[in-house]
Amino acid sequence: MLGVLDQRFFLWILAFSAGFIDTATFIGAAGIFSAHVTGNFVVFAATLASGHHAGLSKLVTFPFFVAGVLMVGYFNGKLCKKRGFFFMISGLVILSGVGLIFFKDGTSFYACVMGLVFAMGMQNAAHKIFLKNTPTSTVMTGNVTQFFLDLISKVKSPIYFSTIEMVVSFFVGCVAAALCGIQFGIVSVILPGVLLLVSSIMIKD
């Protein structure tokens, strides 16, 4: 099974998972973005404007996200390679999801949510390092911009079609998270975790 998964399909899974996890934490953890982490700055500012101070938890996501990025950057080539990092990301997502089955609120609940944020930081970094020259899987603004710039350009970029594919995959992940969340809540992040686990085993190292 090793090395049999097409990179294009793997990118779809990454985008789907990021959209799913980002939506699941936003809905189930009081408006926390786990993949689009800078969106938490906007949410924090909005809470200040409304006169509330509960939005401080949104800012806590940033160091966890950065820690995930730094971990991949530091241990790249020392601890493991491409497959190993994506395997760890999937494991952390599943572990956080399982933790959310038992912890419904309080510090333990948010610790599990920060585990998801950390995992998305790792995915951002791993994508940059191991999947160079491919559209990002976590923040879609750049992909949308690139697609429409290419649309009006005579010379298409090599990632012309894959940019919109990533946006669609991310969107499908968002919708799936909303639908699964109705039935299972934030615990549903286990689903993309399992998808990531299977795909990380099957990709080329």
Image: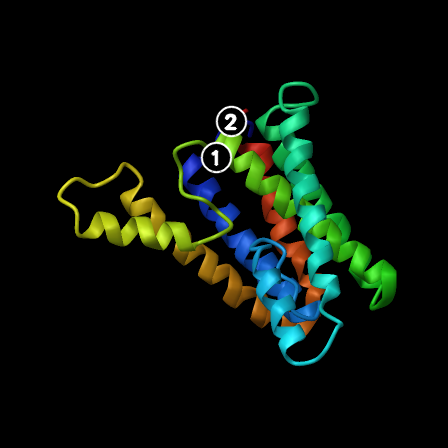
Q: Secondary structure at mark 1?
A: loop
Picture coordinates of residue 7, whole percent (x, y): 43, 35
Q: Secondary structure at mark 2?
A: loop
Q: Quadrant of the C terminus?
A: top right
Picture coordinates of residue 131, whole percent (x, y): 47, 33
Q: Does residue 31 show up? A: yes
Instruction: Establish if 139 lies above or below 158.
Output: below
Amino acid found under the numbered disc labelled 1: Leu
Residue 58 circle label: none
Q: CA distance from mark 2 to mark 1?
A: 7 Å
Picture coordinates of residue 184, whole percent (x, y): 69, 69
Amino acid found under the numbered disc labelled 2: Lys
Foreground residue, 52 or 141? Answer: 52
Given contact means CB atoms under 8 Å apart, are the residues at marks 2 and 1 in contact?
yes
Which class describes the residues within 10 Å of circle 2: few (<14), some (14-19), or many (20+)? some
Residue annotated with mark 2 = 204
Q: Indicate the quadrant where residue 80 lies.
A: top right
Foreground residue, 116 or 2? Answer: 116
What residue do we see at 55% from left, 33% from top?
202
Instruction: Establish if 60 lies above or below 87.
Output: below
Foreground residue, 51 or 185? Answer: 51
Residue annotated with mark 1 = 5
Picture coordinates of residue 160, whole percent (x, y): 28, 44
> What's the coloring here?
rainbow
Q: Does residue 93 show up? A: no
Instruction: Establish if 203 lies above or below 160.
Output: above
Q: Indicate the quadrant where residue 46 lies.
A: bottom right
- Residue projecting furthest to the left: 154
Q: Quadrant of the N terminus?
A: top right
Foreground residue, 33 or 38? Answer: 38
